[in-house]
Image: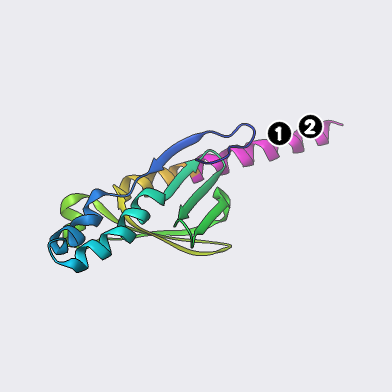
Amino acid sequence: MIDLGRDEEVVTQAKVHWACLIPHLILFPAFIGILTIIPALIRMFTTDMYITSKRLYGKVGLINTKTLDTPLNKVNTVSIESGLLGKILGYGTIHITSSSGSYEFKSIKSPEAFKAALLEEIDRFDEKRIKKQATEMAAAMKS
């Protein structure tokens, strides 16, 4: 779970879709399926993605982790990649570029909805920030 700051709340959370296990389940009768399903299960249960009212947080991995924790106004691009099976079952890979680097979150359930929620929250964050600056400037000009 994510540590929230003051006046911060979780807006939405992304989950890994169960379909990421399909290739491993097909191979499961063979010994190789048993070996390949373990990393997929670890990725499935250790991937976290949250949109809060102030930032975007994402983490992938158990031992070798990659973490994204960036303010909403530092998110540069959000793109989605989805194959035929992903379109049918409703999952895809979300690519996020921020001022601190590029991140990839694979097999995310309902990636279009997550992207829409993220872009909406970025707009809301910017509006709040601009209103706060305007209020502070008005107060400074009155003084």
Counting from the top left corner in percent of width and height, residue 16 is at: 32, 49
Per the rendering, the mark at residue 67 is none
For residue 45, side relative to residue 58 (left or right): left
Residue lying at 83% horizontally and 31% vertically, measured from the top left: 142
Q: How busy is the neighbourhood of tag 2: few (under 14 within 10 Å), some, or many (20 plus)? A: few
Residue lying at 18% horizontally and 62% vertically, measured from the top left: 23
Instruction: Give me the C-alpha separation between circle 1 and circle 2.
Output: 6 Å
Residue at the extreme right of the image, as rendered: 143
Q: What kind of residue is marked 1? A: Thr
**Which type of secondary structure does the marked residue at label 1 adopt?**
helix
The magenta stretch is 122-143
Q: Are marks 1 and 2 in contact (CB under 8 Å)?
A: yes
Displayed quadrant of residue 60 = bottom left
Q: What kind of residue is marked 2? A: Ala
Residue lying at 26% horizontally and 65% vertically, measured from the top left: 35
**Which type of secondary structure does the marked residue at label 2 adopt?**
helix
Counting from the top left corner in percent of width and height, residue 138 is at: 75, 34
The residue singled out by tag 2 in the image is 139
Residue lying at 87% horizontally and 31% vertically, measured from the top left: 143
Q: How busy is the neighbourhood of tag 1: few (under 14 within 10 Å), some, or many (20 plus)? A: few
Residue at the extreme bottom of the image, as rendered: 32
Which is nearer the eye, 60 or 108? Answer: 60
- Magenta stretch, main secondary structure, is helix
Counting from the top left corner in percent of width and height, residue 61 is at: 44, 57
Residue 45 highlighted magenta (yes or no): no
Which is nearer the eye, 56 or 116? Answer: 56
Per the rendering, the mark at residue 135 is 1
Residue 137 highlighted magenta (yes or no): yes
Which is nearer the eye, 25 or 142? Answer: 25
Counting from the top left corner in percent of width and height, residue 131 is at: 63, 36
